[in-house]
Amino acid sequence: MKAFYLFVFDWLCDKEVVYILNIVKKKKILNHLLNIHPTQAIVLGFATIILIGAVLLNLPIASKDGQSIGFLNALFTATSAVCVTGLVVVDTYTHWTVFGQIIILTLIQIGGLGFMTMATLLSFVLRRRITLKERLLIVESLNQYNIQGVVKLIQRILIGTLIFEGAGAIILSLRFIPDFGVVNGTYKGIFHAISAFCNAGFDLMGEYQQFSSLTMYVDDLIVNLVVMSLIVIGGLGFAVWDDVYRAKNFRGLQLHTKLVLSITGALLVFGFIFFFLMEFNNPATLKPLNIKGKVLASMFQSVTIRTAGFNTINQPDMTNASVFVTMFLMFIGGSPGSTAGGIKTATVGVLIFTVLAVIKGKEDIELFERRINHSIALRALAITAISVVLVVTVTVILSIFKDATLVEVLFEAISAFGTVGLSLGITPSLSDISKLALIITMFLGRVGVLTMALALASRTHKAHSKYRYLEDKVMVG
């Protein structure tokens, strides 16, 4: 599809770009390149932003020691930022200059909202009309089903983002100013608000201790509530925002919104109760805290592992049961069309109701007094199966090239896929091959494994056949 490239070129200039593009097209140099599917455009767009970010972060001016960090480490950091993951090979505060930190923050914002949302914002600023082909790209990037109202949806997304991030930045700045001063405190407030809303997990608390994240604020009511609120709101999905804003009550919500809110709420409550009980007497995590600290830390852990990546307790110090449940919730992730990763809450919800339909002997998959098509269940199953294969493959690769326990490498692989950013402490010491494996995993986790599969398969896609094979039976179970 030509929309993505035409969109980028039109930003630079109109007449000159059209003139050059026509010349190039006459020479048939870009004809094949421009004729791409929307899913391919999304994948290519994210990849382009990552490469640009990697080049900028590799500059000596981006590092405090004045030395280039090396392209692979720069690529890892850029991928982690654009894919809003939070896995880092160096501490964000102690290694990167303000220039490098701003580059990371910009990549987080672009990656969190999606490159088409940011491109549309630029078109609004330039008062440029959004073409039909560009609207199709927006539909694909936001996981929408139709083109009607997508531009207005983008406007509401941008306004909502400004409100939520702005409010979070103000509150966090007021909290951090007494600790860091006016300028540094305000800067930290803005950085952490954007990072939390985009579910990125990058932090600037290395001023206390490297890789400490928000552990210094484990029992701070303001920091915990603000960061948790931003994480949850950012992870719900833009379509859910819009539906909640329009609906008058729960019954008036769309089926997708009901499913997302129900699964999200259930996972948050389950995570809180589980971590509170399992870590209550753990001397390395909750035991030294008072009851308020225990409640806040348990709530924060339940929220952050759903793709945010901040932490207020040290992950390696948790019990084995807590580590396992953390991996389970990281794999699920946030919701479709949001800043989060993982297989998504809606996917899990569809699988649950599909299993219930099979158990009850029903042919229809029913939820909230509605019926969904079996193709959606097949899509959910495909996403889950591909994701499991990906995580297992990456875990095997990390096991081969990293001297670590199976739990550590599995945790790292799931964290990368779910774009969470939590780690049991092995990220900085990974080999080059392991870093490349995680880079690919973070990228797939952000764009979506099924989106990537469709992008790779679209060139060989053929029209639906007009015939069907004979039906037969296979024994399962």
Image (cartoon, helix red, strand yellow):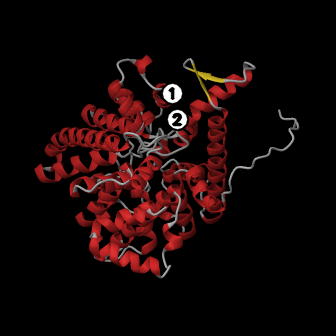
Residue 167 image-quadrant placement: top left
Amino acid type at mark 1: Leu
Q: Residue at x 72, y 18 (%)?
A: 360
Q: Is residue 197 above or below residue 99?
A: above
Give the Cα distance between marks 1 and 2: 8 Å
Q: Is residue 240 above or below residue 81?
A: above
| Number of numbered callouts drawn | 2
Q: Residue at x 51, y 47 (%)?
A: 418
Image x and y of residue 125, in percent: 21, 55
Tell me: 461 left or right of 249: right
Front disc: 1 or 2: 1
Image x and y of residue 172, in percent: 21, 41
Tell me: 218 left or right of 162: right
Image x and y of residue 105, in percent: 30, 56
Query: Considering only order in the chain, which callout, 2 or 1, is on the residue closer to the N terminus?
Result: 1
In the rendered structure, are the residues bearing label 1 and label 2 in contact, judged by CB atoms less than 8 Å apart?
A: yes
For the residue carrying disc 1, how many other residues have a C-alpha within 10 Å: few (<14), some (14-19), or many (20+)? many
Q: Is residue 472 above or below residue 451?
A: above
The numbered mark at residue 259 is 1
For the residue carrying disc 2, how many other residues have a C-alpha within 10 Å: few (<14), some (14-19), or many (20+)? many
Image x and y of residue 468, in percent: 80, 44
User: Circle 2 — which element?
Assistant: helix
In front of the other: 207 or 191: 191
Amino acid type at mark 2: Thr
Residue at the spot of label 2: 345
In front of the other: 189 or 281: 189
> Would you say residue 209 is visible in this rendering?
no
The numbered mark at residue 196 is none
The quarter of the image holding the C terminus is top right
